[in-house]
């Protein structure tokens, strides 16, 4: 599956952005989808994930209550609504597909679940203070 992320940009602290990730192929609805981010000098980290039919969502603790992941399987697209953005949210954001179709996982396992899946090219999010 090929993934194309978009929606990044420059926003002031407290602002909002919505990221989108469009996927190719007919099997999108069978994949867990995830968002990850990588700030300069840091390792890539998990942000949020959603199950294939959308009934399960997972969030990294620092984004709970601020970020919402959702998906539209009819449009082969996953979204990340980001509210109350802070400078520490500045990073390149990547979407990923769990092509192994892991049935259930914890947030601590998320990087391992998605590591060998398909990844998009990343979109830059910059939050100014």
Image (cartoon, rainbow, N blue to C red):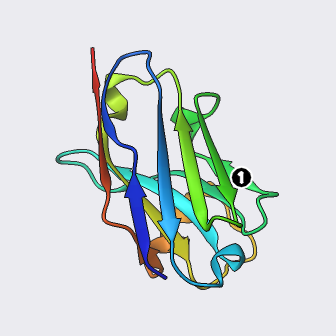
Q: Is residue 66 left or right of residue 106?
A: left
Q: Position of residue 121 (x, y in %)?
A: 31, 65
Q: Where 76 sits versus 20, above or below?
A: below
Q: Is residue 123 left or right of residue 85?
A: left
Residue at image position (40%, 72%) is 119
Write down the residue under mark 1: 57
Q: Position of residue 78 (x, y in %)?
A: 58, 57
Q: Is residue 75 left or right of residue 82?
A: right
Question: Circle 1: is it few (<14), some (14-19), or many (20+) Cα within 10 Å?
Answer: some
Q: Position of residue 117 (x, y in %)?
A: 48, 80
Q: Where 9 sits versus 111, above or below?
A: above
Q: Position of residue 61 (x, y in %)?
A: 57, 37
Q: Where 87 sits versus 129, above or below?
A: below
Residue at image position (69%, 59%) is 72
Q: Quadrant of residue 107?
A: bottom right
Residue 70, visible in the rendered structure = yes
Residue at image position (35%, 42%) is 8
Secondary structure at numbered mark 1: strand
Q: Quadrant of residue 31?
A: bottom right
């Amino acid at each position: 599956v090929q993934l194309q992320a978009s929606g990044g940009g420059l926003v002031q602290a407290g602002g909002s952005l919505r990221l989108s990730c469009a996927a190719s192929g007919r099997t999108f609805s069978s994949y867990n989808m995830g968002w990850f981010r990588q700030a300069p000098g840091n390792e890539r980290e998990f942000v949020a994930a959603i199950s294939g039919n959308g009934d399960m969502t997972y969030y990294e603790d620092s984004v709970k209550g601020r970020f919402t992941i959702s998906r539209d399987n009819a449009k082969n697209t996953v979204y990340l609504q980001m509210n109350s953005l802070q400078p520490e949210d500045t990073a390149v954001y990547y979407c990923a597909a769990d092509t192994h179709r892991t049935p259930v996982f914890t947030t601590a396992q998320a990087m391992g679940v998605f590591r060998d899946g398909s990844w998009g090219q990343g979109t830059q999010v910059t939050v100014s203070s």
